[in-house]
Amino acid sequence: MGKTLVSASGARILVIGLVFLAITAPLRAAPVPVSHDLTVTLDPENQRLTGKDTLRLEARGAVDLLLSLAPDAHIVSVALAKEATPFAFDDGHLRILLPDKARHGEIEIAVSYEGFFRDTVPVNPVQTEDPGYGVTGIISSEGTFLLSGARWYPDLVGSRPTFRISVQAPAGWRAVTAGRRLSSETNGKTTTSVWETMHPLQGIALSAGPYVVREDAVGEIPIYTYFFPEDDPLAEGYLKATAGYLDLYTDLFGPYPFEKFAVVENFFPTGYGLPSYTLLGRTVVRLPFIVETSLGHEVAHGWWGNGVFVDYQRGNWSEGLTTYVADYLYKERSGPEEALTYRLRVLRDYATLVSPEKDFALRDFAGRFSPASRAVGYGKAAMVFHMARRMVGDGAFWAGLQRVAQKKLFKKASWDDFAVAFEQKSGLAFKPFFHQWVDRPGAPDLALESVDVEQDGEAWRISGRVTQKAPYYNLSILVRLETEGKNIDTTTSLTGPEAAFMLRAGTVPRRLLVDPDVDIFRRLYPSEIPPVTNGIKGSESLVIVVARGVPEDVREASKILMETLGQNRAPVLREDETSLSSLQDHDILYLGFPEGKTYLPPLPAGVSVSAHGFTIEGVTYVNAEDVLFIVLPHPEQAGRVAAVFLPLSAKAVAAAARKIPHYGKYSYLVFHDGVNQAKGTWPVSASPLVHVFPVREAFK
């Protein structure tokens, strides 16, 4: 709307106010505490919001107030102590002059305004790193979605306020936001929902729509589902799962810090953990595995990120911790093998998605914006908490988290606060630990060297060295000897370039393994990484090659795959224009199956491709809706990959292409009409951290 300047009494005061407000800046940080008494009316047909916000605060000597509001909002009026007062509104900044008498003690500012929220909602989004796909605010006939970033209410810059919010919407439309529900009533053509927060928040979001509301409770904590009518049958499962997560995390972290927890359905794809509720897109809510995975992750955010705030200037620890106590912990509770597989996947994601050029210190992580940032901020951070837990033991680890939750509730916390908590609960020095893992980019590069075995009668003596490349880490590393009898473990301390170890066995040694349970975050060797989808997704030197005979409509349709993989800038060549030698320094994605016999390594056993279809896992696929995506080693260059995207028709492309990036850990994928039919990962060939003893006559 540009600049707006309004005065209570005529042009003379208007000019004086203009001069004063133009030259005056706030003399101090935002006054605190602040409370909002906010009444808004939603007009979905016109995508409009009208509101009146009454802010109460302690002025504490401030000469003016600076409020933030949507730049194209229209300010109807501003009143100080119920009397109109001058203000200036420019590019989303509302500045209000405080007269001398209002600069001390409690003051009341009322802002009446209106605005339109018309962000474009993605119909078929291809990039998934932004949980809202760039949307911050929309009011539509399908529903309302307003993040605090939409600036849908006047926010005092720098404050952490409390709220009382009354939302008027069309009859049958129920609104949900943070805090406890005071009432929800329909009167004629209007449904009014009233909410109140008891704790200071860093911002507040609002969702509304024609929801069916279901309710249960865990002790004194109400739990809700706000689902669209067609998905209401899912409510019972979500309520039951939510209750289980609240019980689990109350035991681990202490009392749940909010007044309720709600699962709210959004009308377009989202995945947000907001104070006291989660906002999940319609397509997400319907996925059968969400109640066992993502839902618990969002409940855990009630403690970490929403309850205990992140000090973003010192690094976002929240996503890594929540990943560890949710996604990883569920695998651990399912069994040790599933937990080990999860840790190995974290290392493989890091190795395939985070090149040294893309790497950064955890202290610099604010939020995910790319696959590489996710691999660091979520995966590496989760492993840091795993290593901390192994260092102090379960008792001290969970007690340390409880201490942070208690001491820092509704305050900012940093990695340093976790170091202090773990130190106090374990008696161990933790600052050096967090320094090497949080303040430095990268990961240890380990190897097993100089392995020697000596037989002495019926016993064996095995020795060797664990080495690392600079910069060095201080590590406590498990070395395991597998024998014909029992396994024998020893722990070696590695603080420099190498550490020697020695084990004795009473039975024939078979294998020697360093970090056999994958408990240390490290950079894997190429031989430890099977060719997987993430190798294409994370490639910085990808070339796309269109195989001979690929129809033009398939080629055009396949552009969506390049977008979903984040590789839409990769050069596109035709098979006739290339030779294998020209592709040696590149990862390759073939569109269609190349005719050149040397362009790919031999296909794995059980995989075959013909002119009319393909066979994998003993099943032959020949329908137009079928798609194969397979990742293989580069035929001539170790550490690089070559993939084939083979849709059997153009119409099969779109549904599968949007799914493929979500299967980053797999080597082969089969889809029928967009539904996954088969998936798997090739076994790894070898590891520099594994030594296999030869079978010798002396060992028999």
Image (spheres, grey):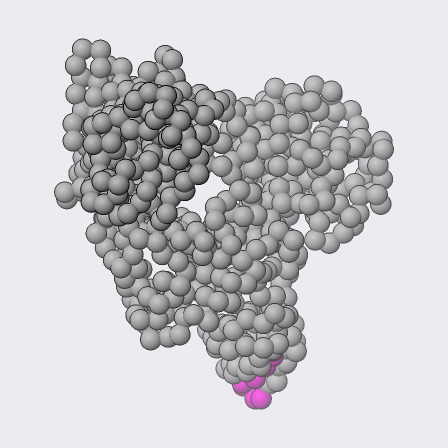
Observer-nearest of 398 and 289: 398
Observer-nearest of 682 and 58: 58
Residue in the image at 62% along x and 32% along y = 563
Q: In this view, does 399 lie to the left or right of 336?
A: left
The answer to whether any part of residue 683 appears in the image is: no
How many dots with numbers? 0
Residue 125 in picture, x, y percent from top left: 52, 28
Specify start and end residues of the magenta stretch as a single range.
Answer: 456-464
Question: Does the magenta run of residues contain 457?
Answer: yes
Q: Quadrant of the N terminus?
A: top left
Residue in the image at 43% along x and 70% along y = 431
Residue 373 in picture, x, y percent from top left: 54, 48
Q: In this view, does 225 lie to the left or right of 505?
A: left
Residue in the image at 48% along x and 49% along y = 366
Residue 4 in picture, x, y percent from top left: 41, 24
Q: In this view, does 476 lie to the left or right of 602?
A: left
Q: Is residue 644 above or below residue 531?
A: above
Observer-nearest of 246 and 81: 81
Q: In this view, does 67 lie to the left or right of 215?
A: right
